[in-house]
Image (spheres, rainbow, N blue to C red):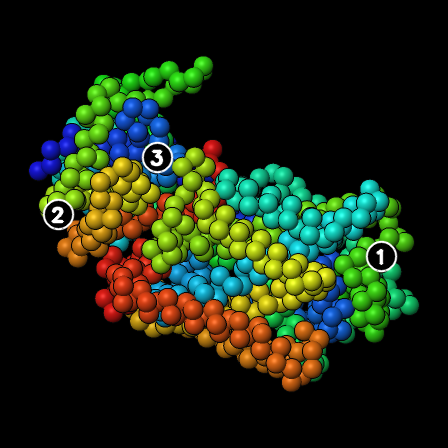
Amino acid sequence: MTTLLGPLADDLWRVGHEDTTGNPWIDAHSMALGLSAALLGELWLGRHVRIGQGRLEVAVEQPLPVDGLGESIVRLLAREASDFTLVSWLTFLARDSYEQVTRRMAEAGHIAPQRRGLTGSAWVATKTPEALAPTLLLRYRLGKGYPLVRYELALVGLLSACGLEKALLYAATDPAVLRERLAEWLRWPDMPPALVDLLKHTSAAAGRAVMTARTRA
Amino acid sequence: MSTSRSAARFSVADALRANRLGTSSLVFFAVAAAAPLTVIAGGVSTGYADTGFPGIPAAYLVMAVILLLWSVGYTTLARHIVTAGSLYAYIARGLGPRAGLAAAGVALLAYPVMHIGLVAGFGAVFTEVIAVVAGADVPWWVGAFAALAAIAFLGTRKVDLSGWVLGVLLLGEVAVVLVYDLVMLTHPHQGHIAAGPLSPLHIVATAGGFVALVGVTASFTGIELPTVMAEEAKDPRRTVARATRVAVLVTGALYAGSAWALTVATGPDNIQTQAQAHGAQLIFELVSPYVVAPLVQLGQLLFLTSLFAAALAFHATAARYLYALGREGVLPGVLGAASRHTGAPARASLVHSLIAGTVLVGYLAAGLKDPLTHLLFWGTVAGGFGVLILMTATSAAVLAYFHRTPFTGETAFHRRVAPAISGLLLAVVLVTSLDQIPILLSVDADSPARWLIPGGYLLAALTGLGWAIRLHQARPDVLAQVGRGADTATAAVPAHL
């Protein structure tokens, strides 16, 4: 089991923002896609949904997630999962995944708004060790060549899919080794097929979002 | 209970649809990338002047038909492969990563060449406009480098293709072109409307016919855009295919019609002399006796913006290739990163602009002085040659992919007949046009210069192939993943590819 705080989307948020300033490492849309994939990843890890062949299926025999955000997503999926593809769900959830995850973290007291300049504000972690934990833990385990558990593998895959590798490698002592280990894990032949599917579709969606240069409302 | 169920159902589908594009929007993007006035005032006129080939309208019609068939196979494959890639990704998935990288090499020659040509064309037209408006004598390269710099900057931001500025300009362009066409068709030379130039027989009967087909291909390059934007589509399965077809038809009809209208106004026998006399100003000269001066000036201005928009579109395509290749690790990963603030492929964009700038500087340093012919016209035809190669390879990739993959639910027409016929026709066009390249370049039939275009692409393809071989030795995992993306049908990808 991982020692990370979780849940998955929260940890992705932590990797995606600088600990002291709250500045994001990537653009908002890529982050939103990553978070939306992470929310689905949470449900997959909790065995609430099954992912395969570009589609989602709710495991109706499972109890609903304890987390409010997860529960609302599962309810929605239970009604409509069969009508839409995984990519559609990623896009749909990405509309407000950023706001939802930020709100969830704020309500749990992990982040708080901080004044910035004259009129702006940014969300910053309330406890720096918490904020740094995912990045440092992944760096440590990758650097030492330790095995990753499913949760950590999902996190690593997601941050890679939405372009957050630079956050992981920034100011690391041996970025080349980290990059190599990261690449090895991403092509691990025993990666659960559901995770493979989720990561590939997220990666494709994130890439296309950059390439089509459409601004989003 | 059931009302709340249907209400919720309404909301998800609605929410997905709200920010999505319908067929008409996708068609719009495709046509915008094709830039009507650039093609008609710039490309077609210079084509008539340079080659004297009267069947350019026919070339548009014939190419439109071939591309309609081609788009069937292409959009069918795109439904099965979810990739953040361009044409090379589809070729890689169908024919293997080595073929994919060879294709990427071809693309990285074709699109920059067209971009440079259009930027140079912008500079040349800019000079003329400034001469009329301000009486100043500005060298063409001033406008060219200004456009290059502006495009380089825009590429680092997220320049929204759906931006209303570009939209209004495009609608203006199309409206102006339609008005001009009407004027020209209602004032035929010596009162006689000759439909001869529309006859497809010109392609086979007249010298230069097949190379004209190559030349017109560049005008159609927007048609791969709806597929790239598939996630944005309301109903990806149908909208994308429909939008691609409509884009081909609209583009083909508009260009064929306008190119024909030019010959009607001058008389088919005089088109070459007239085009040589007036160059890119031909269409404006022909309509100015019959329309109010402001309408002609508006056309001139829209011609300028059209060149800019077209150059921007090709720049975006080239940057997309660089970004996608960087993302996959084929090219340095820094190219594959999106800008932190705007989410645009900024580095890829700047690298491409740098290359284009270097080529322009080289052209100037070589003391050459005819950017409209050398860079714009030859560049567009050379680029069209490359795009044709890519399209032919894509048809082959479609055939190969569906041959290997059973139970896809696609009809034989979609996965075999259409790609086979279109691939064959495109290959015929390519091979037959090789003979006719001297006509295009205005050199002797046995001059070694005629190998410049095919030779350049062969070199580009070999470079891509060489890169693939090097990758196979250094990073075989990267090579195996080229163009992979995600499959909608199967989660596991065949190991041998």
Residue type (three-letter) at the residue carrying disc 1: Glu
Q: Secondary structure at mark 2?
A: loop
Q: Nearer the viewer, residue A41 or B374?
A: B374
Q: Which residue is mark 2?
A: A145
Residue B159 locus on image (x, y percent): 53, 41
Foreground label between 3 and 1? 3
**Residue B129 in view (yes/no):** no
Where is residue A7, by image quadrant? top left
Residue type (three-letter) at the residue carrying disc 2: Gly
Give above or below for B406 relative to A186: below
Residue B374 locus on image (x, y percent): 68, 65
Q: Which residue is mark 3?
A: A25
Residues tagged 2 and 3 counted as in contact (Cβ below 8 A):
no
Foreground label between 2 and 3? 2
Q: Secondary structure at mark 1?
A: helix
Give above or below for A196 relative to A89: below
Name the chain letter of the residue that bears numbered label 1: B
Name the chain letter of the residue that bears numbered label 3: A
Name the side, left or right, on which B391 lies relative to A85. right
Rendered residue at 36%/21% (across/down)? A122
Q: Which residue is mark 1?
A: B285
Alpha carbon of mark 2 to alpha carbon of mark 1: how far? 73 Å
Where is residue B394, by image quadrant? bottom left
